[in-house]
Image: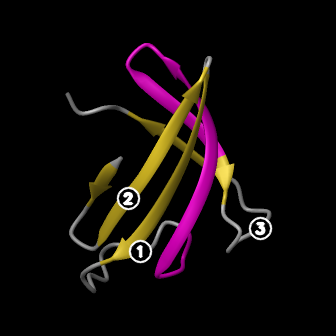
């Protein structure tokens, strides 16, 4: 998985097992743009999540060891 904006690169991988998807995504700042704040308020972070697919969307829930107790939720749409 690859994504990003003018300040961050989002790099990850995923594995499908039945209907469950497990994913890991790391965030790396590549440009100091104050308009974009880090997703977990740290300059470089790593999140692990589990998810599922519904039609053209993927729903994920998880968290980061760098910020325990703070949930991460995401809806992702593949780029075709």
Taking the spot 37% from the left edge, 19% from the top edge, the residue there is 56
Q: Are marks 3 and 1 in contact (CB under 8 Å)?
A: no
The label shown at residue 37 is 1
Q: Magenta stretch: give its range.
A: 40-61
The label shown at residue 11 is 2
Q: How is the image coloured?
A: secondary structure
Is label 1 in a helix, a strand or a loop? loop
Taking the spot 31% from the left edge, 32% from the top edge, the residue there is 78
Quarter occupied by residue 57: top left
- Separation of marks 2 and 1 at Cα, in angstroms: 17 Å
- Separation of marks 3 and 1 at Cα, in angstroms: 19 Å
- Separation of marks 3 and 2 at Cα, in angstroms: 21 Å
Q: Is residue 80 magenta?
A: no
Examine the residues drawn in magenta and state their main secondary structure: strand
Of the image marks 3 and 1, the number of the one nearer the N terminus: 1
Is label 2 in a helix, a strand or a loop? strand
Taking the spot 62% from the left edge, 53% from the top edge, the residue there is 48
């Amino acid at each position: 998985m690859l994504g990003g904006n003018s300040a961050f690169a989002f790099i990850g991988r995923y594995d499908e097992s039945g209907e469950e998807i497990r994913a890991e995504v790391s965030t790396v700042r590549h440009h100091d743009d104050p308009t974009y704040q880090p997703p977990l308020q740290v300059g470089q972070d790593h999140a692990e999540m589990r998810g599922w697919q519904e039609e053209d969307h993927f729903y994920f829930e998880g968290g980061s060891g760098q910020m325990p107790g703070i949930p991460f939720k995401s809806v992702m749409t593949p780029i075709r």
